[in-house]
Image (cartoon, helix red, strand yellow):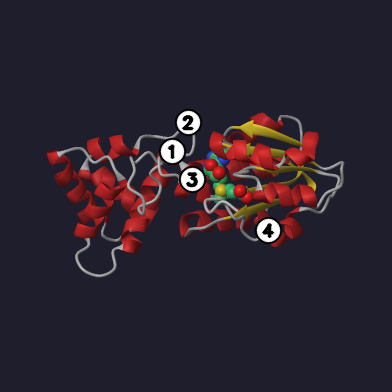
């Protein structure tokens, strides 16, 4: 297996909880490289249909290759899951899956700047609607930067980091992962810098891709597009998403 290949999370559990209609119609709203999709289709009969959505064209290409053996049972949309209403129109699904965040493929891609482990331009875009992180770092005011780092990274030294970003960019623009990483390292003083670095990278990635707004919009729409008895499964990886998803399900239960 390619070391950069994405290993899908909790595959058996996802299939067990999601697929209760082996002849049904399912949506993998974050198909990535197709790991969960493959398992969902594998759990169905020849009548099962799956719609795969992803905003990352490279990931979707890999999913197309992987899912070729399923032929016409699977269709692909290069787009955003928060537009699910447009893609489904009058169709209703028996199950919808969203496996949030980044794939290992995106993280490991040296050209995309998601990882603080690889020196690269701070692109951080998952799809074409992404905002520019480089522009933010070099143009935004200190206050706005601090707020983004605090809100989306829950980093307690956000103000100091923002101050140092503004100071540093006066010399030359901040454009790479290693430049940003070293500013965070210098901002936090002693101790292990990795947790802060990873929170700052998370914050910028979430901001750039509008991840929380997209998720909020998706959840509200997705439940409207389920058949009676249909299921919505969401895999979340950090506390901001997790809180949003749990609150949503709780509110839905209350009716
Ligand atoms: C954790 S990965 C999914 C991996 C996938 N389950 C697999 O087995 O390969 C998350 C995927 O969601 C995609 N994504 C993130 N936000 C999206 C959005 N708003 N609409 C569509 N896809 C999105 C990313 O491009 C990424 O490929």
Q: Position of residue 66 (x, y in %)?
A: 68, 43
Residue at the spot of label 3: 106
Label 2 near label 1: C-beta < 8 Å?
yes
Q: Is mark 3 within 8 Å of ligand 1?
A: yes
Give how far apart the Cα atoms at labels 1 and 4 are.
Answer: 26 Å
* Circle nearer the N terminus (3, 1): 3
| In the rendered image, the vertical position of residue 11 relative to residue 141, given as above or below | below
Residue at the spot of label 1: 125
Residue at the spot of label 4: 11
**Hey, which residue is sitting farthest front in the picture?**
1
Label 1 residue SS: loop
Label 3 near label 2: C-beta < 8 Å?
no
| In the rendered image, the vertical position of residue 159 relative to residue 211, given as above or below | below
For the residue pair 156 and 129, the one nearer the viewer reads as: 129
The image quadrant of residue 175 is: top left
What crowding class fits label 3: few (fewer than 14 Cα within 10 Å), some (14-19), or many (20 or more)?
many
Label 1 near label 3: C-beta < 8 Å?
no
Label 4 near label 1: C-beta < 8 Å?
no
Residue at the spot of label 2: 128
């Amino acid at each position: 297996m390619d070391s950069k290949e994405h290993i899908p999370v909790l595959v058996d559990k996802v299939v067990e909880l999601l697929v209760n209609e082996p002849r049904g119609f399912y949506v993998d709203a974050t198909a990535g490289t197709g790991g969960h999709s493959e398992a969902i289709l594998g759990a169905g009969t020849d009548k099962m249909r799956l719609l795969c959505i992803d905003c990352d064209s490279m990931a979707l290409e890999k999913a197309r290759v992987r899912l070729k053996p399923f032929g016409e049972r699977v269709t692909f949309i290069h787009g955003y899951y928060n537009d699910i209403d447009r893609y489904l129109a009058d169709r209703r699904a028996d199950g919808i899956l969203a496996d949030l965040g980044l794939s290992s493929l995106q993280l490991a891609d040296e050209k995309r700047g998601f990882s603080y482990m690889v020196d690269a331009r701070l692109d951080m875009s998952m799809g074409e609607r992404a905002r520019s992180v480089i522009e933010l770092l070099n143009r935004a005011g200190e206050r706005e930067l601090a707020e983004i780092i605090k809100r989306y990274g829950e980093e307690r030294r956000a103000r100091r980091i923002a101050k140092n970003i503004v100071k540093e960019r006066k010399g030359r623009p901040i454009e790479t992962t290693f430049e940003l990483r070293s500013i965070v390292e210098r901002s936090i003083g002693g101790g292990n810098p990795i947790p802060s670095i990873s929170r700052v990278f998370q914050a910028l990635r979430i901001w750039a891709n509008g991840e929380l707004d997209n998720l909020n919009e998706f959840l509200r729409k997705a439940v409207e597009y389920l058949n009676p008895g249909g299921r919505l499964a969401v895999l979340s990886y950090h506390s901001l998403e997790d809180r949003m998803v749990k609150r949503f399900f709780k509110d839905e239960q209350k009716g």
